[in-house]
Amino acid sequence: MASKNPTASTTDEMLLSPKHPRGAEGENSFETPCKRQKKSDKYKAFDPEEKEKLKKYETCESQTRKVLNKTYDKLFDDLSRDDAQKEIIYLKRRLATLKKKTSLDPIRIGFLGRTGAGKTSLLNAILGKNLFLPVSGSSVCTSCVVKVSTNRTDQYEATIHLLTDDEWKEELKNLVEILSKNGHDDDDDDDDDGCVNDAIEKLHALYGEGAKDNNYEVLLQTNLQVTVPAKRIISLKAQQAEELSRKLDPYIRVRDEGTEGLWPLIKYVEVTIPGSEILPEGVIFLDIPGTGDFNVKRDEMWKQSINTCSVIWIISDIERTQGEKIQAKLLEESIKAFPGGVCTDIAMVVTKSDKMDLDEYRSERKNKDFPLENEHDAILERNQDLKNKKERFIKEKLQRKLPLDSEVLKKDKLVYTVSAREFWNPKHLSPEETEIPELRDYLRKIYLKEKQKLVKDYVTEVCGIHRLAKNFCSTPQLEDQIFQESGVKELMLKDINPLEKHLEKRFDEIQQPLRESVEHARKNYKNTVNKLLTRDEGYRGYHRTLKAVCLKDGIYASRRFARIDFNESLAKPIYHKVDTIFGSLFRTQNATRTSLWSHLEMFKNEVQSKIRQTGKNKHLPNNSRKIEIFIQETNVILKKLEKQILWSKSSIYQSLSVSIQSDLKPCYKAASKAKGQGSYEQMKKILMEGIENEVKNQMFEKAQSKMEKQFHQLKREILEKLKEKISIVFSLVFLKQERAAVHLADIDPECKEIHEIYFKLQYDN
């Protein structure tokens, strides 16, 4: 199997990378008939033409890995010498990276919705496994992220990752602080938000009855009532889906009698199922809770999960879809993933769409001139009306944040109304009318498109590195002398200067809106703070919620009030002004002259044009092998740079709220220590005065400066990387005449094999 991404070294990053990377280094010649049968059924869900394409891609990928491994083994000793030149080091790193690399990056589909919205039932239906993952039902489920993917095994597996001891101690301290009355009269002050109940249930589950009355030091000395594995990981395996479901249920459900008490310690859960005829291998589902979590690590993972999804489905049941504030909040969080993450597609999936009181609907419907014959017609009519309304709402929200020609705004469909219950037990709707098959088709189209593109790119890159390696061990030729003496290298590097000016201009375009929005944020911050501290539905128990906000540095995943984030709320006027410009700057789809990527493409084209023109001026053949190798390698450099830029933009985007949070941490800490009668008013006063002082100390200007600094840092990194990589590639391709060629092992057979695979793929449409 391919190795894991070496950058995914932390526990949190493990969630964001596949547990079992796809793509074998070679086919197993000792496959059993059973395994061969499973492989033949792997793409059963696709139509015959698509199935043949996918098999072709898989064969090409597997063959490419075989060739690459042979090449790497042959060249390893030659490339590992202590006195290796930088070109040799570059070649070795490229080969090693390609050897580890999976051709298909995970396609992450995020299911974002509150408990009870029907996320799990929907996922079970898409997987074709009724009641496989435990649904919430009458009990509440854990607020951790659950990741579901397929794997080439015969078993169903689940891995439950627990908080570290230090992570739990940090949360324990905050839970005890939430429960501490500290002289406050709480007799008639139950916390309607549920943070007190959550804290009590967590302590009860781990420490037993009466734990809520103990202080932090006592609880630290109290033995847990559950057994925590030393490695903080629990592995479950089963031969059947139903068996794994039973084993997993106690860890996901948290309030049924007799459940395991480990649920407060669960950080995230990974579930892998055997290769599915419905779910393509390489699609990963992330079941994401609606508002994050009180625990800082789970909350960080909540945000990371959203930002790593290329597709987000906002899940809402039909009874809550109309007018519920949390749906607008979830949509807002999802849209942030466009400029702040890698999201390129979004949809709202309305579940339980079969629910209807026919008599009630008949009396309320506007279209009374057309009588309804039955419940089937009523459901379809109501669902279509809902789709029309919600699609207008979503498009309006998207248009405020994204460039108007964004691909997602051109989609024919942004809302789906589904019914898992009708899918399994048809009563009023056909399977097609439940829209579950349509969502499956949606996934298959995404998968097929990505698989085609990424396998082609991968094979092309492997082909290029073979040509580069073969060229490196060749003897110097006339072409080398021509290009070394032509001065074309210096001309290409001079193209960095106009690129730098273009990048400066693009980054400068965001500075004016930044300054204006900072001024707007300064003028309106008091209104923002007042809204955050004012409750339309009263203050009963809200001092507990506000304390939770302060304990978590301005962020609290509240059930009743949705997600509370003081830092993003204060930064919102700035985001409102720069979101569209930010989106235009970093867009890769339909790139225009305002995008960063368009200028990098222009630079690449200029560099390649100079190489071609030099060859033409010196009467070299149009199909010069060395020129084509150089062209290929510059394409690779730009592709790698694009990925780095996409991940950098997330850090840049979040820098505003991160900066504000950093400045306000002392203020939050001071407010969290308020005790006794009137603690809410104390906290409110500390927060208002603290925020006012930080605004006077240029909190917003500091945030602006940090964002601008990150923009300029990105610009420097882009320019330095381009200059370095192009110089190395030029030296690799056009060896200096006076330098003897480095002796490398013969890789002619591997070059021939990889070229045959490459040309076979080019004929695929």
Image: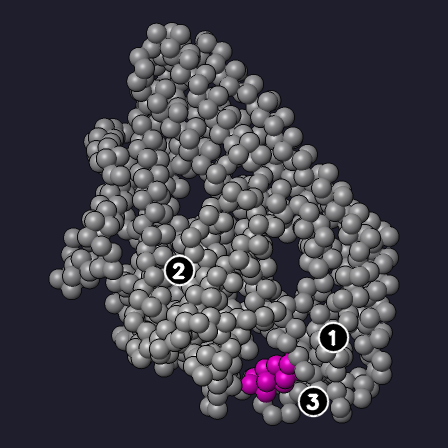
Dot 1 corresponds to which residue?
A: 536
Q: Earlier in the sequence, mark 2 or mark 3?
A: 3
Mark yes or no: residue 741 visible: yes
Q: Splitting the image into 4 quarters, where does residue 482 fall?
A: top left
Identify which residue is drawn at 76% across, 43% down.
516
Q: Residue furthest left?
A: 33
Q: What is the three-letter code of the residue carrying label 3?
A: Asp
Q: What is the three-letter code of the residue carrying label 2?
A: Ile
Q: Nearer the viewer, residue 29 or 400?
A: 400
Q: Is residue 266 left or right of residue 175?
A: left
**Range of residues picked out in magenta:** 194-207
What's the mark number on residue 284? 2
Q: Nearer the viewer, residue 155 or 548?
A: 548
The secondary structure making up most of the magenta span is: helix
Q: Earlier in the sequence, mark 1 or mark 2?
A: 2
**What x and y, as percent, mark residue 753?**
21, 34
- How many numbered marks does the figure carry? 3
Q: What is the three-letter code of the residue carrying label 1?
A: Asp
The answer to the question of whether label 3 and label 1 lie on touching residues, with beta carbons closer than 8 A, is no
**What x and y, as percent, mark residue 201?**
59, 85
Identify which residue is drawn at 56% across, 84% down.
206
Q: Judging from the image, what secondary structure is the residue with disc 3 in?
A: helix
What's the mark number on residue 213? 3
Q: Judging from the image, what secondary structure is the residue with disc 1 in?
A: loop
